[in-house]
Amino acid sequence: MLPDDIVATDLDKDVRAELLSLNKPVAETVARHLVATGQLIDEDPAEALAHALAARRLASRISAVREAVGLAAYHAGEWQTAIAELRTYHRMTGLQSHLAVLADCERALGRPERAIDLFRGADQAKLDQAVAIELLIVAAGARGDLGQKDAAVAMLQVPDLTSEATVPWTARLRYAYADALLAVGRREEAREWFSRAADVDTEGETDAAERLLELDGVLIEGDDEDEAEEIAAGPGAPGSVPAQPDSDLTAGDDRDADDRDTDDSDTSDREVDAEADGHDDDEDFDDDEDDDDEDFDDDEGEDDEGEDDDEDFDDDEEDGVAARSGNGEDLRGEDLGGEDEDRHADASGTSPATAADSTTPAGDDSRADDTLSGDTVSGETVDGDGTAPARGDEPESTQR
């Protein structure tokens, strides 16, 4: 939502001229968003970036809009967005006015070599003096990032360093040179150049005065008290400020957690697959047990037949002994045959007439029953009525 005090007329005339290609209501809205971006870029870079993006949604082909998005993203720490937008701006205009910002974004992304390449590839003759100096400062810092501290000092020893002319970038150049000297241990020279930087820094663009006091061993009272209060409070103590983790670090932790979640998910999938394989093995094992039980039942049926034959043979022998008289005559076929029939009838539970009517031997019935009970349909035991038992009647498979 745009505040009422932000008006399109506050926008630079050259930029407003670029917006003439848009419809008037759209141009008015875009202009107000650009004004808001300029007002908030130092105080609230994130909000400034939001206004710049709103303007881009309405006028993405306006170079000034892409420039505003790039600079707002740079101040908000959105390095990739800043690089993309400022490169687009350079292509649209043919200018190279933000090479120093691009190089600084490369340093922030941990790519100092690219920052140095931008410095080497720039056409110094076509660059504005302020842009050239800023690019030099960034390239020297990139040398320091690579551990080439002496090279950084040498790069900054340019004629503009000792110039008596007071220009906006003089304080920044001297400050960068003093910082490079301090990095290589040239403390006294660093103190001198911090002092010279503070002399020309009337706008307070650098903290050269504070760095000079630190080298002189002077503690700044306000900073010392704030530091003491933070130490006394400690993390979690009343009045302490909760520590906010670095966004770059927390982003790395989130990826590791995702990887761990993915690994856990893969492990769970493997466990589920193993469990499914176990169930399949159990089903195969149950089928094997059923087949073994069927074979065992068939063997028992055959053994029962053998035992019945043995009992009949023993009865026949006893009858033969009883049928012989003392003089060795065979008495079989007389009244003892009826007694033998009665005894067999009592043992089988049927009358002699019923036993005589039966046309199928007992051994054949036993085999038929065993065969019927042992029949299987798709690996399942069939009941006597020819139907497979319900799935719930099967024994639970034991996971191995």
Image (cartoon, rainbow, N blue to C red):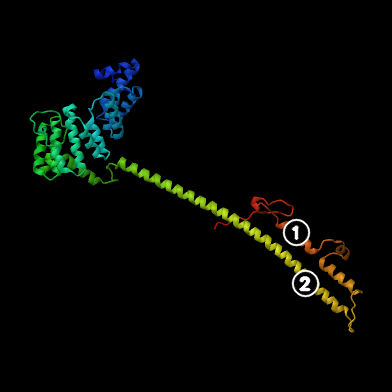
Quadrant of res 107: top left
- Residue 9 in the image: above or below residue 135: above
The residue sitting at the left extreme is 164
Return the residue nearer the eye: 305 or 28: 305
- Residue 188 in the image: above or below residue 339: above
Q: Where is residue 87 in the image (x, y as percent from the top left)?
A: 28, 29
Q: Mark 2 points at which residue?
A: 310
- Amino acid at circle 1: Asp
Quadrant of res 133: top left
Q: Can residue 210 be seen in this view?
A: no
Could you tell which of marks 2 and 1 lies nearer the N-terminus? 2
Q: Can residue 190 be seen in this view?
A: yes
- Residue 163 in the image: above or below residue 252: above
Crowd class of label 2 (few under 14; some 14 to 19; many from 20; radius 10 Å): few
Crowd class of label 1 (few under 14; some 14 to 19; many from 20; radius 10 Å): few
- Amino acid at circle 2: Asp
Q: In this view, does 7 lie to the left or right of 256?
A: left
Helix, strand or loop status at disc 1: helix
Q: Position of residue 41 (x, y in %)?
A: 26, 28
Q: Position of residue 398 (x, y in %)?
A: 57, 57
> Which label number is shown at residue 369?
1
| Count of numbered tags | 2
